[in-house]
Amino acid sequence: MDRTTAVVGGLVLALFGGALLLWCAAEVRLRHRIRRRGVPAEAVVVAEDDPHGELDSAPLLAFSALPSVGGSGTGRYAERVLARPRGHTPLRRPARFAPGTAVRVCYDPRRPERVVLAAGEISRPAVADLLWSALGTCCLAAGTGLLAAVVG
């Protein structure tokens, strides 16, 4: 392999792997924090207006959120929020997320569009996180290996 190609390939792989690992860590931390400190609610799976929306593995959810924290509180009622849960990435949408189905969620009271499925609603939450982390680790290791081979 040409030296320039190895350097560029190593840098691209290392940067991609590092960014993917940082993204995975931030996303897992965010979801964990929302599940622990978020407001529990019951959401309903909404039918998609867009025919391509059904291809998204995360269902569109509708729920009522309390007024945001820090507001004046006068004249504010619960607002209806439409959002997709974070961290739900199977290849196909499970049948249990059919339109009209009720699911338990937790949301961030300051930003109600940040919503995650409650712990009991997802069967294997760590599997997708481990797969994305493994991909990031492999890319980072391959990029570092290419750069080490060029330097050494």
Image (cartoon, rainbow, N blue to C red):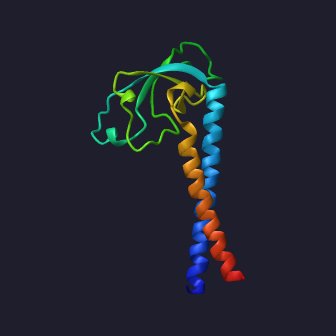
Q: Looking at the picture, does residue 152 appear above or below residue 104?
A: below
Q: Quadrant of residue 112?
A: top right
Image point 59% across, 80% down: which residue? 6
Closer to the camera, 21 or 63? 21
Q: Quadrant of the C terminus?
A: bottom right
Q: Looking at the picture, does residue 96 appear above or below residue 42?
A: below
Image point 39% across, 29% down: which residue? 97
Image point 52% across, 39% down: which residue? 87
Image point 62% across, 30% down: which residue? 34
Q: Quadrant of the N terminus?
A: bottom right
Residue 36, horizontal then vertical, whole percent: 66, 27
Residue at the right extreme, as displayed: 152
29 left or right of 123 in image: right
Residue at the bottom extreme, as displayed: 2
Residue 92, horizontal then vertical, whole percent: 38, 41
Closer to the camera, 137 or 115? 137
Residue 38, horizontal then vertical, whole percent: 62, 25
Residue 49, horizontal then vertical, whole percent: 29, 33
Q: Quadrant of residue 129?
A: top right
Q: Looking at the picture, does residue 115 appear above or below residue 25?
A: above
Closer to the camera, 75 or 89? 89
Number of numbered tags placed on the structure image = 0
